[in-house]
Image (cartoon, helix red, strand yellow):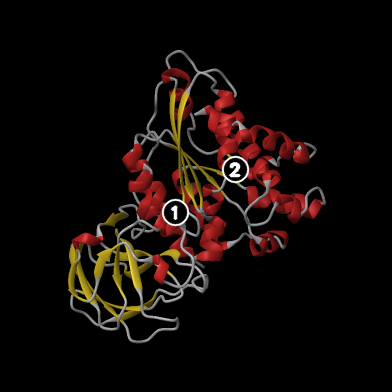
Amino acid sequence: MKRRFTAYRCLILVALSLIVSSGIAADHVAYRGNFQNARIKFEQAKTGNVAFIGGSITEMNGYRPMVCEILERRFPETKFNFINAGISSTCSNTGAFRLQSDVLDRGDIDLLFVEFAVNDDQDAHHSRAACIRGMEGLVRHARIANPNIDLVITFFVNESMLANLQKGETPLTIASHTAVAEHYNVSTIGLASEVADRITAGTLTWKQYGGVHPAPAGNAIAASMIDALMSKAWDTPLSSDVALQSHPLPASPLDPASYWRGRFVDPATAEIQNGWTLAVPDWSLLPGSTRERFREIPMLCGEHAGDTVSLSFVGTAIGAYVVAGPDAGMIKASLDGGPFQVVDLYHHHSKGLHYPRTVMFATDLKAGEHTVELKIAAETRSKGNAARIIQFVAN
């Protein structure tokens, strides 16, 4: 496992040399609750399952391998299993729905790193309510599944968020995610505020930081802040009688409708009435590019107005994790025989890319059994009427 990160050692040293003259502001590293469980596993069991979930900032070779390198340095005798659950373009809502399959199903996780502030802002354009439903869904689900899991939420930054911070305003996504972190006593890394302060002080430029997808210098700042959190939390030796301690779970969520029961629902369980097919799309015949991870996945596909499919499910919300390309259309959705509501699949990034996103057909339903009927609409604002569903999502 350690060989995987050797190439990053030089990058870390170079990047850290650019930031060593600037100390980390203590108030940008928020240590909350008990952060000892992961350390106990790493030191005593000599094993560690560490997962990272987020968007492209997590998926890329950026802060994630640097943090892995730091953990391996801190615990040289520990055998680590590192899980990269980053998927470019995805938001915290998608994260909440895929947490089970992409992270929790891969073993008992000791330490989970989360980042979605940028994608909730510039990709999903989430409201405060949507930010909380996604982030709280992820955090609460993780803590219910494994009460011992330690979590860290890192706030990355884009240009508009940076401008807000420099005006003394907290970006909506950061404020929303912070509310979740405070409610669950989860530690946070205020990278966005740290970067804003350094740029304002003239000790860092946006170009040095690297932009939305940080350069090695920007990722090294994030990694060094996480390292500082570990130093603060783990500054004294473990006592001989130390034991794992469950994190208290608040009796009530911030939002009762948060997606903490979020899960995928296999599209093969849907009932096709007409037109739809379940197969791997022939991407060679379709306009727009497709990311490699989606090219071999069977999808529930409808392409013509009137194509109809239905799905029975249990829960309080239903939607779909889709790829929406240049031909993405609109879906009319009816819950339990009610009136149809139109959901547009096309995204502003769909023009040249089959873009992964989660759309919701209904939320705030009464808990129980429901049926959703989906019909391809005749209206479209793209080059077609297509719908390609990777998974249904339910809460």
Residue that badge 1 annotates: 135
- Which mark is on residue 51? none
Residue that badge 2 annotates: 63
User: What amino acid does circle 2 point to?
Assistant: Tyr
Residue at the image position 34 percent from the left and 72 percent from the top: 387
Where 186 falls versus 163 (above or below)? above
Question: Which image quadrant for residue 272?
Answer: bottom left
Residue at the image position 68 percent from the left and 38 percent from the top: 11
Apparent side of residue 220 relative to residue 68 in the rendered image (left or right): right
Q: In terms of depth relative to the viewer, which is nearer, 102 or 306?
A: 306
As helix, strand or loop, the secondary structure at mark 2 comes to helix
Where 326 falls versus 368 (above or below)? below
Q: In terms of depth relative to the viewer, which is nearer, 118 or 212?
A: 212
Q: Position of residue 194 (x, y in %)?
A: 69, 48
**Mark 2 vs 1, N-terminal side:** 2
Q: Nearer the viewer, mark 2 or mark 1?
A: 2
Apparent side of residue 43 relative to residue 316 in the rendered image (left or right): right
As helix, strand or loop, the secondary structure at mark 1 comes to helix
